[in-house]
Each structure stands twice: as structure tokens, then as C-alpha cells.
Image (tube, rainbow, N blue to C red):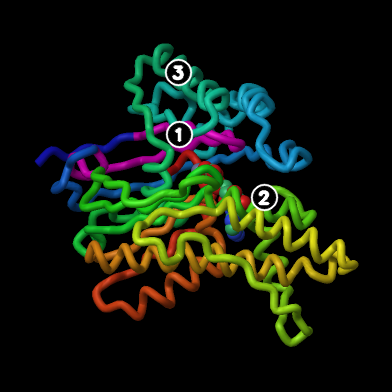
């Protein structure tokens, strides 16, 4: 069996984070490569550095990511991020890495192109091989990343994981992806309109809160206590009983818009109703995500459920999935590490 060790420089600019990371990997070929079912025994992965330069503050005033601005910021920061990433990894130059990886999509075209051009230039200058990485596959694989600088054994859990069901929930995607093995994917359901993260962002905007909306909505929802007296508001659970694994969140956002408008028109102060609406909206999104995931997990008889993407930081979603999956015999839920829920290059 071929043993190998290598240093990988990862570059990610798909949205509003300029991120780079150096990983050291060693083990037997080739667990992460598409189509490899076996191999990977004893494969180790270590994060030598992970730098994320976030543009959130710049986009917050627009209530969403402004693509041209994102591209400009990536171009402005990318050199600095590379320097920091190499220094944190204890490297002097890109010449010391063996491979360059870059997010090739999906994402904002004008933002992606900055990272791709930068990566190609480095690959040409230092004569290194370059690989394009699918951003969603990256999110999935964030589940295999070790905590900080410890190394993790990638393959040790494989027989408890596959076949796995991935729930990928981000600002741009909501997908249920069946994964029979490393590098093998089958899309079984997705959103027909807004993504779950997008719904959180739009609902936050309707309720007069900041961007990105997810953390604001969930913090506001936590403030809601039924004991304080409540209006008994109820929002729809879109597609909950549809016979497929697709999602739809655009109607929920519209329902929040009308509900808020009607209450404010009947002289309820926004501050007085915000936490109850946030609570009910979060409950609706989580209900639909969890119900469909459980249904798919049982139907496809998977061994595990993996959660990834920005919305995987949501506490209610994490805890509900954990609780509900623990009731099903033979299915494990791997709770994602909070370090890698947002966009990052290590994944
Ligand atoms: O994966 P990600 O960082 O970027 C994309 O690839 O889209 O996901 C960003 C999304 C945003 O819509 C944000 O509101 C959402 O993740 N998000 C959350 C939470 N933290 C981030 N949604 C719900 N609850 C959270 N705690
Ligand atoms: Zn993402």
C-alpha cells in the first residue's frame, strides 16, 4: 500500500469570506478522491492553519451580500490572508506545499473568480498541481475536520457512517444528499425556492434585525417565553406533508411579512411581537428540516445523518436533530463542530 504525506493549501472565496488553510495529510491513498470506496485506513489530517477574513460588517448595511463589493474585498485582502495562513502554518513560501485547492463553485461568480485566478497564478508560479473543489462537498467534509491542531483519523469511523444522509443548509442551498461512500453523492431533495439560511436572513430583515439573520433570529427566539403572555401566533410548515424530500421557504417568509405588517397595523409595537414571531418562524423552519431528514433517513436506511452549512450553527436545529435521531435505532447523528459551520478553506 502506498503511504503518502502532503501539505495542502486551500483557498475559498465563494461568498463573503476570504479564507485560506494549510492541512497536512498522511495515510494510504486515497480516501477523499471521488469514487474511492476502500483505502484511507489510518489516514490522518491536521489543520496547520485556518484564516478567515470575514466581510460581514461591510455587507451588513445592505442586508445581504453585495457581489461586486465581495469581489473587491477578496482582491484587497487575498495577499494578506495568504501571508497569515503561511505564517500560522510555519511555512515560508507556497513552494513548500504540495497541492493547491480552490473552491470552484457553487457561489458568487465574481467572488469565486478572485480565488480561482489567485490559485491558478500561485500554481503556475510555484509549479504546483491545482484542484477545484465543490463548495457543498467542502461543507459535507467539514464533518471530518479535526478540532484545532489535533489530528483526526478520517477513516476510523467509516463503517459507522456510510451510507450517510447529509442535510446541507446554507445561505444559498438546502439539500438532502445521500452518500453511500466517500466521494459518492445522490441528491434526493432540495429547496424549490429560498434556502433555509436565506429564509432566516429575510425574516430577520422583516423584523428589523441585522445580517446575517440566522444568529439574530435565534437569539430573539430564545428571548420568547410563553409565560410572558403570547398571542398564539402560528406560521405555516411548507411542504411538511408533501410526498417528496423537497423544501420551500419563500411562502414562510411572505407569511412572516404579512403577519408582522398586520400586527403593526393593529398597533402592536414591533418590539412587543418580534420575539414571538422569531420563535415561531425558527420553529417552522426547524420542524420542516427535521421531519424531512428523519423521513429520508428511515426510507434510505442510512447509518448516520451529517449536518453542514451555515445554518448548522442553529442550536434548535442541532438539538432537535440530535434528540429525534437518538430515538431511531441504528442511526447516529454526528453533531458538526461549531468551528467549521461558516464558510472556511479548511473544509
Ligand atoms: O454556509 P454559509 O456560511 O454561507 C453560504 O455558503 O451560504 O451560510 C450562511 C447562512 C446565512 O444565511 C446565515 O443566516 C445562516 O447561515 N446562519 C444561521 C445561523 N448562523 C448562520 N442560521 C440559523 N441559525 C444560526 N445560528
Ligand atoms: Zn457555504
Mark 1 → mark 2, Cα distance in angstroms: 21 Å
Residue at 87% from the left image edge and 67% from the top image edge: 266
Task: For marks 1 and 2, give the one nearer the viewer.
Answer: 2
Residue at 78% from the left image edge and 84% from the top image edge: 228
Decide which of 295, 130 is in the foreground and name it. Answer: 295
Q: Determine which residue is flagged by label 1.
A: 106
Element under disc 2: helix
Mark 2 → mark 3, Cα distance in angstroms: 38 Å
Q: Are marks 1 and 2 in contact (CB under 8 Å)?
A: no
- Which disc number belongs to residue 122? 3
Decide which of 89, 192 is in the foreground and name it. Answer: 192
Q: Which x, y percent locates residue 255?
A: 66, 59
Q: Earlier in the sequence, mark 1 or mark 2?
A: 1
Q: Is residue 103 left or right of residue 131?
A: right
Q: Is mark 3 within 8 Å of ligand 2?
A: no
Q: Tally the numbered discs.
A: 3
Q: Is residue 308 left or right of residue 172?
A: left
Q: Earlier in the sequence, mark 2 or mark 3?
A: 3
Whether residue 9 is situated above or below residue 268 in the rendered picture: above
Q: Which residues are magenta?
A: 7-33
Check disc 2: other Cα within 10 Å, few if <14, some if 14-19, many if 20+.
Answer: many
Q: Is residue 104 left or right of residue 112?
A: left
Decide which of 212, 19 is in the foreground and name it. Answer: 212
Residue at 50% from the left image edge and 33% from the top image edge: 107
Q: Determine which residue is flagged by label 2.
A: 202
Element under disc 3: helix
Q: Is residue 177 left or right of residue 315?
A: left
Whether residue 150 is visible? no
Quadrant containing the C terminus in the rendered view: top left
Check disc 3: other Cα within 10 Å, few if <14, some if 14-19, many if 20+.
Answer: some
Magenta portion: prevailing SS class? strand
Per the image, is 150 magenta? no
Amino acid at each position: 500500500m502506498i503511504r503518502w504525506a502532503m501539505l495542502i493549501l486551500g483557498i475559498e472565496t465563494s461568498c463573503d469570506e476570504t479564507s485560506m488553510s494549510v492541512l497536512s495529510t498522511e495515510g494510504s491513498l486515497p480516501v477523499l478522491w471521488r469514487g474511492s470506496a476502500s483505502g484511507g485506513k489510518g489516514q490522518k489530517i491536521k489543520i496547520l492553519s485556518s484564516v478567515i477574513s470575514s466581510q460581514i460588517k461591510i455587507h451588513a448595511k445592505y442586508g445581504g451580500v453585495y457581489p461586486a463589493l465581495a469581489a473587491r474585498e477578496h482582491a484587497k485582502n487575498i495577499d494578506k490572508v495568504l501571508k497569515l495562513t503561511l505564517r500560522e502554518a510555519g511555512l515560508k513560501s507556497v513552494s513548500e506545499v504540495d497541492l493547491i485547492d480552490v473552491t470552484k463553485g457553487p457561489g458568487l461568480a465574481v467572488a469565486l473568480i478572485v480565488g480561482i485566478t489567485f490559485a491558478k497564478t500561485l500554481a503556475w508560479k510555484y509549479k504546483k498541481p491545482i484542484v477545484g473543489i465543490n463548495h457543498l462537498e467542502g461543507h459535507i467534509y467539514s464533518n471530518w475536520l479535526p478540532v484545532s491542531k489535533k489530528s483526526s483519523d478520517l477513516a476510523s469511523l467509516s463503517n459507522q457512517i456510510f451510507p450517510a444522509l447529509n442535510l446541507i443548509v446554507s445561505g444559498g442551498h438546502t439539500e438532502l444528499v445521500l452518500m453511500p461512500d466517500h466521494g459518492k453523492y445522490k441528491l434526493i431533495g432540495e429547496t424549490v425556492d429560498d434556502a433555509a439560511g436565506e429564509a432566516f436572513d429575510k425574516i430577520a430583515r422583516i423584523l428589523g434585525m441585522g445580517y446575517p439573520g440566522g444568529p439574530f433570529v435565534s437569539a430573539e427566539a430564545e428571548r420568547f417565553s410563553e409565560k410572558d403572555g403570547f398571542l398564539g401566533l402560528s406560521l405555516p410548515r411548507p411542504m411538511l406533508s408533501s410526498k417528496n424530500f423537497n423544501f420551500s421557504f419563500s411562502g414562510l417568509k411572505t407569511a412572516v411579512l404579512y403577519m408582522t405588517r398586520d400586527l403593526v397595523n393593529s398597533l402592536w409595537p414591533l418590539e412587543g411581537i418580534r420575539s414571538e414571531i422569531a420563535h415561531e418562524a425558527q420553529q417552522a423552519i426547524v420542524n420542516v428540516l427535521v421531519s424531512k431528514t428523519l423521513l429520508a433517513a428511515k426510507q434510505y436506511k442510512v447509518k448516520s445523518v451529517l449536518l453542514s452549512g451555515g445554518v448548522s450553527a442553529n442550536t434548535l436545529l442541532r438539538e432537535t436533530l440530535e434528540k429525534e435521531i437518538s430515538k431511531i435505532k441504528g442511526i447516529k447523528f454526528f453533531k458538526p463542530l461549531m468551528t467549521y459551520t461558516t464558510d472556511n478553506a479548511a473544509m
